[in-house]
Image (cartoon, rainbow, N blue to C red):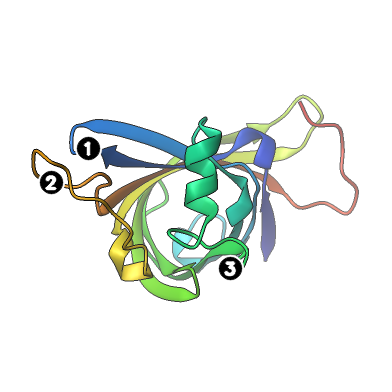
Amino acid sequence: MTTWTLDPSHSTVEFSAKHMMFTTVKGRFADVQGTVIATDENDPRTATVDVTMKAESIDTRTEQRDQHLRSADFLDAGTYPTVTFKSTKVDGVKDNFSLIGDLTIRGVTRPITLAVTFEGAGKDPWGNDKMGFSAIGKLDRREFGLTWNQALEAGGVLVSNEIKIHIDAQLARAQKETTQAA
C-alpha cells in the first residue's frame, strides 16, 4: 500500500460559473489538502481519495464576491468550514478513468463523477516521487443548497446553476522525512 499526499503548492482546485448568462467567472480554493492511498499503483481502481478544502480560502480575485461566496447565501463558511470529497469508486484504466465520490458542501453530500487523466510521473530534483493528474466535472449547485440568485431584467439569472470543476493535482509519495520542495 502506498500513500500519496497532495502537493498544495503545485495543485489547483478551480471552479467556474456563468455570470449574467454570458460571462465565465473562475475561482479556486487556496487551502486544499488531500491523500490518495493505493494498494496497486498500476491500477487506479485500488485507490481511495480524500480531499478537504477550506471554505474560507475561496478566491475569485474579487474580495467583495469572495465575501459573498463565504456568506450564508453560498458556502456559509462560518457554519461549514470545509468542503470535502471522499472517493467511493474508480472506474477505468491508468491513463483515463472516472473517479466517483461523495462531495460535501454546506453539510449536504451528493455523488459526483470526475473524468481523470494521468499526466505523468517522475522524480523531482531532490529524489521525491511525484505524479500528476487532471480532472474535470460539473455539478448543479442547487443540489447542495446553494440557491441564492437574482433574476435579470433581460431574462435569465445572475449566477448559473451549473458549476464546472477543473483540478490539476500533483501528488508526492508520502515519506517519513520531508525534503526540500521547489
Q: x%, y% of residue 53?
A: 59, 55
Q: Are marks 2 and 1 in contact (CB under 8 Å)?
A: yes
* Mark 2 or mark 1, earlier in chain: 1
> Dot 2, how many residues are within 10 Å of its Cα: few (below 14), some (14-19), or many (20+)?
few
Indicate the quadrant containing the N terminus: top left, top right, bottom left or bottom right.
Answer: bottom right
Q: Secondary structure at mark 3?
A: loop
Residue occupying the point 36% across, 55% down: 114
Disc 1 to disc 3, how far (Cα)?
Answer: 27 Å
* Mark 1 or mark 3, earlier in chain: 1
Q: Are marks 3 and 2 in contact (CB under 8 Å)?
A: no
Amino acid type, label 1: Met
Left or right: 14, with 182 as reference point: left
Residue occupying the point 82% across, 29% down: 126
Amino acid type, label 2: Gly
Pick whichever, 127 or 153, lies toward us.
Answer: 153
Q: x%, y% of residue 106?
A: 49, 69
Residue at mark 3 = 80
Q: x%, y% of residue 84?
A: 54, 64
Disc 2 to disc 1, how far (Cα)?
Answer: 7 Å
* Mark 3 or mark 2, earlier in chain: 3
Residue at mark 1 = 20
Residue at far front of view: 153
Indicate the quadrant containing the C terminus: top left, top right, bottom left or bottom right.
Answer: top right
User: Which mark lies nearer to you, 3 or 2?
Assistant: 2
Residue at mark 2 = 156
Q: Secondary structure at mark 1?
A: loop
User: Which mark lies nearer to you, 1 or 3?
Assistant: 1
Q: From this view, report whether residue 100 is shown above or below residue 65.
A: below
